[in-house]
Amino acid sequence: MNKYKGFLLIEVVLYIALFSLVAIGTFSSFYYVLSVDQELTEGALIIDEAEFFLGKISWVINISDEIISPSRGGSSETLVARSDFQGVISVSLDEEGLFIRYEEGEKNYLNNSKVRPENLIFENKEINSGSGGTVIKASFNIKDRQFGLIRGI
């Protein structure tokens, strides 16, 4: 019969080592889940903002009676359109972000502080030569992802 009651020092050390390995695995898994969640949240925010920008650009094109800039066959960093309903509307990008301006009023910024589009370009292209039809192509980047739309006018 064993006259000692309790744990031996080697048993305690082994239990502590085993608990440490389990704790390290748990914490590293938890950290990985948090980092993946952050990446997914950021990606969803970028896509949501891009869809919002594209929707606003599409709205300007759809309500316009005339595209002033870019001229037919040209490209520009600013879309300028005239609408009988809204007057002159411009969509452009500056150091603060993407904005819409009605007539010569204040800039109405569309982006939040976490998502800023870059390299905004508008192109006015003919569909078929001689048919008179044109399309407006808009494209921009957000954190190395490219977004764009094509709308007939």
Image: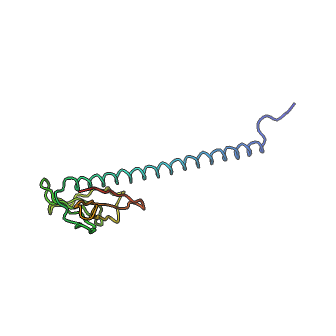
Q: In the drawing, does residue 131 fall left or right of residue 8?
A: left
* Rendering quarter of residue 148: bottom left
- Which percent across, then down, holds residue 81? 19, 61
Is residue 17 or residue 105 the one in the foreground? 105
Classify residue 90 by image quadrant: bottom left
Name the residue at the top extreme. 1
Residue 21 at x, y percent in the picture: 67, 47
On screen, 18 above or below 149?
above
Q: Which residue is drawn at 38% across and 51% down?
A: 45
Residue 86 lies left or right of residue 95; in this view the side is left
Considering every residue shown, the one lying at the far right of the view is: 1
Residue displayed at 35% across by 54% down? 50
Residue nearest the observer in this picture, 73 or 106? 73
Q: How is the image coloured?
A: rainbow
> Picture coordinates of residue 68 (x, y %)?
19, 65
Number of disc labels: 0
Q: What residue is drawn where x is 30% and y is 66%?
A: 95
In the rendered view of the protein, which quadrant contains the N terminus?
Answer: top right
Task: Write the residue at 31% across / 51% down.
Answer: 52
- Furthest toward the front, the residue is 130
Q: Nearer the viewer, residue 64 or 72?
A: 72
Q: Where is residue 108 in the image (x, y as percent from the top left)?
A: 22, 58
Residue 30's place in the image compared with 69, above or below, is above
Quadrant where the C terminus is found in the figure: bottom left
